[in-house]
Image (cartoon, helix red, strand yellow):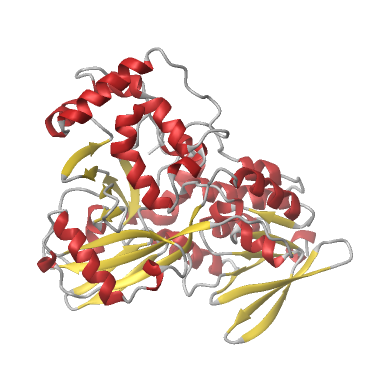
């Protein structure tokens, strides 16, 4: 029996990073057990099925799609999914003050749709910007400063301020500029103007329109991966909430304690790969990081109509509308709703335990109906059925103090030699699915070849460009 096969690795969390870590480890001959507190795999990338009166509807936790620059990862996913991996086209719009704007912005569309003050203000801002220098280091400036310096006050007020405040629940002046630099692909107003000129093919990076998407919802990718892992002998224990860690004299983790069916169980292990939220992992090891997440609640509703619109999603920028995005799952795959019907999913930012989080489902549905009416979607098209779901750790809260807190958390956890943090929640980074999968593979690889890659994983893909733009698909 080889040395590796006796080594037992505990993987905490069965999301994209945890499952990919397990894959690499089991392929290299390790014994692997995955613990997850949910009753399903996939974490935030899972798909839930709702049995309605007209058939089955499927809803993801948010808007996922598969885009990657990594040919190895694409080949892996292609092989895993076979014919069940479809191509989809993305079309999205911004809704603001009763108007609809193409996203990304386009000149003719803006001229046609924007109110005059916006066009005049934008032109004046552009003139000013030709003579101003921009702050380069986004880590020291707020989101508000970063956007205003690049896009001007007019566009900031129209397209960014209300939406961002709603998404984060804090004033954008207290939000780190990191968020903007990782999410917004255009550099500044001059770029916008250049791209908007008719007939100009600018080299500006912009969002990928085509992407891959599994036939039965994004979560199908992870249920399939979990099935393959179990065939290879990986043990996946669901409904298991990690509640403690046992250490030896050298600060190494010897065992993971978890609650399962009302009992506390102990899992002995040689190494731990954790995708649990960074602040939670700190708590389990006796340290308060002060880091927080922003949560999401979803209102998912079947609709008595074939199509709501031709948009994959609509950004809802009005502050008085509860949600930040309206999505129609069917736009990703026609199999997400019964034939001839559709559904909508409203994404509502909140904090665990607040008014939105605790609101009675019926009241929330009535509130969402009013918002839909204001957007021109007839709420009488709804069947009346709904179900609501939650994601507690949706977005790492990148306020102006987060970087210092994150560094302290990393320093605290790095004293435990056989603990590797990875994935979106585990590294407290806003990353996309493919990056989370790559991070899981890196964590496994560092165990396989005995090289400490923890800093590299924490900083992985932290480049100053938008991650979503180039894609081998």
For residue 466, say whether it is visible: no
Which residue appears at 62% of the width and 40% of the height?
459
For residue 70, above or below residue 303: above
Q: Position of residue 25 (x, y in %)?
A: 65, 57
Q: Residue furthest top?
A: 131
Q: Position of residue 391 (x, y in %)?
A: 44, 64
Q: Residue furthest right?
A: 249
Please identify the quadrant where the C terminus is shown. Answer: top left
**459, 278: nearer the viewer:** 278
Which residue appears at 41% of the width and 49% of the height?
78
Location of residue 288 by image quarter: bottom right
Q: How many numbered discs? A: 0
For residue 309, above or below residue 359: above
Q: Position of residue 223 (x, y in %)?
A: 44, 65
Q: Position of residue 434 (x, y in %)?
A: 48, 47
Location of residue 219 by image quarter: bottom left
Which residue appears at 23% of the width and 19% of the height?
197
Which residue appears at 34% of the width and 46% of the height?
163
**36, 380: nearer the viewer:** 380
Q: Is residue 85 left or right of residue 21?
A: left
For residue 345, say whether it is visible: yes
For residue 48, above or below residue 330: below
Q: Residue furthest bottom?
A: 262
Q: Is residue 139 left or right of residue 389?
A: right
For residue 438, above or below residue 471: below
Please identify the quadrant where the N terminus is shown. Answer: bottom right
């Amino acid at each position: 029996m080889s040395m590796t096969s006796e080594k037992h690795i505990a993987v905490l969390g069965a999301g994209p990073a945890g499952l990919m870590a397990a894959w690499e480890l089991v392929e290299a001959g390790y014994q692997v057990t995955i613990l997850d507190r949910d009753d399903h795999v996939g974490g935030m990338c899972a798909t839930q099925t709702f049995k309605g009166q007209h058939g089955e509807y499927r809803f993801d936790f948010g808007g996922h799609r598969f885009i990657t620059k990594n040919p190895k990862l694409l080949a892996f996913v292609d092989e895993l999914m076979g014919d069940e991996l479809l191509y989809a086209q993305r079309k999205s719009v911004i809704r603001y003050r009763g108007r609809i704007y193409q996203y990304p912005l386009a000149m003719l569309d803006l001229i046609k749709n924007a109110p005059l003050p916006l066009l005049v203000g934008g032109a004046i801002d552009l003139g000013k910007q030709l003579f101003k220098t921009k702050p380069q280091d986004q880590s020291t400036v707020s989101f508000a400063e970063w956007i205003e310096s690049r896009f001007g006050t007019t566009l900031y007020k129209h397209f960014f301020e209300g939406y961002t405040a709603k998404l984060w629940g804090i004033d954008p002046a207290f939000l780190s500029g990191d968020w903007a630099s990782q999410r917004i692909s255009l550099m500044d107003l001059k770029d916008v103007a250049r791209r908007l000129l008719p007939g100009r093919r600018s080299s500006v990076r912009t969002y990928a329109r085509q992407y891959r998407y599994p036939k039965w919802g994004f979560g199908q990718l992870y249920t399939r991966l979990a099935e393959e892992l179990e065939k290879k002998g990986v043990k996946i224990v669901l409904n298991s909430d990690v509640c403690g860690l046992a250490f030896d004299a050298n600060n190494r983790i010897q065992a993971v304690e978890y609650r399962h069916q009302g009992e506390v169980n102990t899992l002995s292990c040689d190494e731990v790969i954790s995708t649990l939220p960074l602040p939670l992992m700190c708590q389990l090891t006796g340290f308060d990081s002060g880091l927080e997440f922003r949560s999401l609640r979803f209102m998912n509703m079947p609709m008595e109509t074939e199509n709501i619109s031709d948009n994959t999603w609509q950004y809802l920028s009005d502050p008085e509308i509860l949600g930040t995005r309206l999505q129609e799952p069917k736009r990703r795959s026609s199999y997400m709703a019964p034939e001839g019907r559709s559904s909508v999913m409203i994404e509502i930012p909140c904090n665990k335990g607040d008014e939105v989080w605790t609101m009675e489902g019926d009241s929330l549905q009535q509130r969402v109906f009013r918002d839909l009416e204001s957007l021109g979607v007839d709420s009488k098209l709804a069947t009346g059925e709904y179900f609501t779901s939650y994601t507690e750790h949706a977005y790492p809260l990148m306020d102006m103090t987060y970087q210092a807190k994150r560094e302290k958390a990393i320093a605290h956890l790095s004293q435990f030699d056989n603990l590797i943090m990875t994935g979106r929640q585990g590294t407290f980074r806003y990353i996309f699915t493919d990056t989370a999968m790559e991070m899981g593979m890196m964590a496994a690889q560092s165990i396989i070849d005995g090289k400490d890659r923890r800093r590299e994983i924490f900083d992985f893909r932290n480049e100053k460009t938008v991650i979503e733009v180039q894609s081998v698909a």
